[in-house]
Image (cartoon, rainbow, N blue to C red):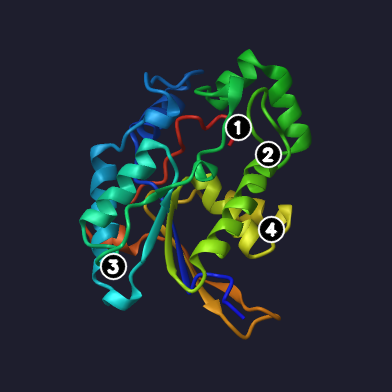
Amino acid sequence: MQQRWPTRLWIVRHGESAGNVAADAAHGAGSDRIDIAERDVDVPLSARGEGQADAVGRWFARLPAEDRPETALTSPYLRARQTAERIRAAGGLTGGAPDSIVDERLREKELGTLDRLTRTGVEQLYPEQAEMRRRLGKFYHRPPSGESWCDVILRLRSALDTVSLHHGEKRVLIVAHQVVVLCLRYLIEEMTEGEILAIDAAGDVANCSVTEYVFQPHEGTTGKLALVRYNFVAPVAEGGAPVTSEPDANVAAR
């Protein structure tokens, strides 16, 4: 029987972006809106984010060639694509690895009408949505024209099926976003709503942190991916880059 899962799977949040910096400034100032001109999909890495991506790329490059990622899948958002490109440029993928595969199902959670609003902004401008989110919880609340965590999970189920179909027995790197990292954990580890929200409440996923799974062939009937590390920031710190975990620019109802 062909192995369904990758031999090893790494999930990396993108490096710090200009949107992360703007969101942090907005929250610090108590503003209702996050001041950034680009569409969320077009927000680039900050200078610190570039350094973080280079550092994690060098960490991957120090692994033996037979242990490095063979394939990289990335969100279409610029900050994720730039992170994947810098990991590759630092030698973080095996030689001859194909160009990163852009998969729109790995994109950031969409906030619709609440995009670029801080929590203060949502409470002031859309108090009915703030109340609905409190009542339903972030897992099920869907902003107008946006997505709930369940919506993100639905598209990620499809993405994982593609990984299984095309990248079984391979070493795969995914570069995406904070909610995507958490929702992939929910799916791979078959968690409950309460379990994944407890992990989320314990702290943000750091920029360029590494979450890693290794395939265990004797688990269950067909094997399964076992978590090796989560939110691992040593590659960033050891590479001389600052460790950051700022919210994304569309943070309001994450």
Identify the secondary structure beneath mark 1: loop
Marked residue nearer the N-terminal end (1 or 4)? 4
Q: Quadrant of the N terminus?
A: bottom right
Q: Is residue 139 visible?
A: yes
Q: Which residue is mark 2?
A: 138
Identify the secondary structure beneath mark 2: loop
Q: CA distance from mark 3 to mark 2?
A: 38 Å
Q: Position of residue 101 (x, y in %)?
A: 41, 50
160 displayed left or right of 135: left
Marked residue nearer the N-terminal end (3 or 1)? 3
Q: CA distance from mark 4 to mark 3?
A: 35 Å
Q: Which residue is mark 4?
A: 195
- From what the image shows, is residue 196 above or below residue 152? below
Disc 1 marks which amino acid? Answer: Ala
Residue lying at 63% horizontally and 78% vertically, measured from the top left:
223
Say which of marks 3 and 2 sits in front: 3
Residue lying at 63% horizontally and 28% vertically, measured from the top left:
146
Kindly indicate whether the residue at mark 2 contacts the one at mark 1 (C-beta within 8 angstroms): yes
Q: Which residue is mark 1?
A: 253
Q: Which residue is mark 3?
A: 94
Kindly indicate whether the residue at mark 4 contacts the one at mark 2 (C-beta within 8 angstroms): no
Disc 2 marks which amino acid? Answer: Lys
Marked residue nearer the N-terminal end (3 or 2)? 3
Q: CA distance from mark 3 to mark 1?
A: 38 Å
Label 3, residues with CA under 10 Å away: few <14, some 14-19, many ≥20: many
- How many numbered tags mark residues here? 4
Identify the secondary structure beneath mark 3: loop
Q: Is residue 202 visible?
A: no
Q: Position of residue 193 (x, y in %)?
A: 72, 52
